[in-house]
Image: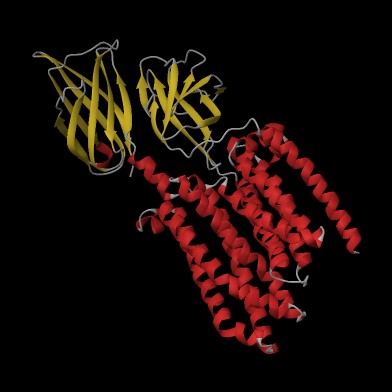
Amino acid sequence: MVDTTSKCVGRIAGGLLGLLMALIIMASTSQAFAHAALIQTDPSDGAVLAQAPKQFSLTFSEPVSPLVLTLVKPDGTPVALTSFRLTNQALEIDNPQALKSGTHVLSWRVISADGHPVGGSLLFSIGAPSEPPAVSEAVDWPSRSAIWIGKVFLYIGLFLGVGGAFALAWLAGNGRAGQRFVMAAILCGLVATPLSLGFQGLDALGAPLPHLAQPVIWRTGLGTSFGWTVLVALISLGLGLLSLAGPRVLARPLALAGLLAVGVALAASGHASAAEPQWLTRPLVFVHGIGIAFWAGALVPLGLALKRQTAGAVAFLRRFSRAILPVVAVLAAAGIVLAVIQVQTPSALAGTAYGRLLLIKLALLVFLFTLAAVNRWKLTASAEAGATEVQRRLTRSIAVEMLIALAIFGVAAGWRFTPPPRALAIAAAQPVSVHIHALEAMADLSITPGHAGPVAASMIIMTGDFGPLDAKEVTLVLSKPDSGIEPLKRAATKPGDGSWRVDNLVIPVPGRWMVRIDILVSDFKIVKIEAPVDIRP
């Protein structure tokens, strides 16, 4: 039976190695990208233009790579935009054709370094606005469910599978209780990991689940930073599998290498790894991942060893109880620092989806830590002394720990769909900008920061043909009729750098505001230009 199992595992490992080599070849041409938030568009959202722009511009907080760019005409006809240039943080997109009057939608989807796609749309009109074309924004629940399930089983493979293999090699001695479970967890991971790559490609391109077999889906998924997570995860799972089925003399080094690869895989992508400063966050994610695998991976083998009262069960328990304290301390410290970096403010815990998921995870962790503390200081000593009834109680308690760990995996997988508050804060701190163009004059207006509250406005005033305009006076007027807010008028000053500024300005509420710039060209002539601007909460 052992020989047959070893042969099967050997075949699986050989197939895994072949798949891994193919993925590495494909990944050699891929790039990594940073987390980004949209901070400026040209034309601005809701702008009404006299004529069609020659190009569109999207500026992000950090460099991005485009996935899908589409222009939807007023009649609902989509036009793929394939000609673009990346300049630092700006994505400049060529307009391939002359546009007719009416309202158009520019839809975009880009990828960031944490492997998560970011998308959105902006509306602009040529001539007079018309009824906006319909653009579907419905959530694709089948794809989203598949992504979540894939994540959960990836965690099961890495934490329970590879972590379990490490526990069997380093803590269990000659005991093999739980080996079948550990092997099954690794096999689940080997199935879920490559599937997760395809799900990543679906999510990146916004494609439905039936498109999973298309090669472009897999190439796109591999081209994100999550592709490296998949590659390293496969290595980790393969090492864990070989430690179980290979020569006993190699079990420990293979299991240790597999455990370290768990940390590398998790640090290669994700919200936490992409956060700055990465010299701190990536090592913390690495340590955090190893700690989870060490703890969670040992639970099932230890519980089964105690339940079956195997010869090495007490020694297994003694080794685990001595090692778990420093592991939990490091695990908790890394988790706290990462949480502070991601959440930043206490109000974000309840005010964002990411924060609410973190609160659920923290509640589960409090329960888990309490249960683990009771096990460690109330039951372990008696169980090590051979008290059979205490060993049974400890086995039941370990089973509850395992269920809590699975629930935590499910919560953590939900973070895939929630941007962390730090990313939202980056976007909120960025200015909002709008280009206002009329026949006699135009202006580039920037409001910093781009959310409600105290702000400063900066304006560059030009003639209608982009020439210099020596204005005598400039007045900024902001109004929000739908909220009953009358025009706020502020005279601008000229600091000497060619711009006009309005400081100490307070925008009381978020939403769409109408901005008007009154330009005194001469003693007898005032030019007024206006456009909408969206102020973030």
> Looking at this view, is 536 or 165 the one in front?
165
Relative to 27, residue 79 above or below? above
Please identify the residue farthest to the left as the structure is shown: 523
Which of the pair 424/489 is nearer the observer?
A: 424
**Left or right of 224 on screen, residue 495:** left
Is residue 330 visible in the rendered structure shown here? yes
Residue at image point 70% right, 60% down: 161
In percent of width and height, residue 18 lies at 79, 41
Query: Where residue 248 appears, x then y in whole percent?
Result: 80, 62
| Residue 525, placed above or below residue 424 | above
Residue 134 visible? The answer is no
Is residue 492 placed above or below 377 in the rendered structure? above
Q: Quadrant of the C terminus?
A: top left
Residue 200: name its quadrant: top right
In the rendered view, how is the structure colored? Answer: secondary structure
- Asked if residue 105 lies left or right of residue 250, the reply is left
- Say which quadrant the N terminus sits in: bottom right
Q: For residue 247, which quarter of the picture?
A: bottom right
| Position in image of residue 245 (x %, y %) | 81, 59
Relative to 53, say whether 491 is above or below. below
Side of 521 relative to 159 (left or right):
left
Give 479 or 361, whichever is nearer the viewer. 361
Image side of residue 454 versus residue 396, left or right: left
Q: How many numbered circles are shown? A: 0
Whole-percent x, y for residue 389 in the image? 68, 89
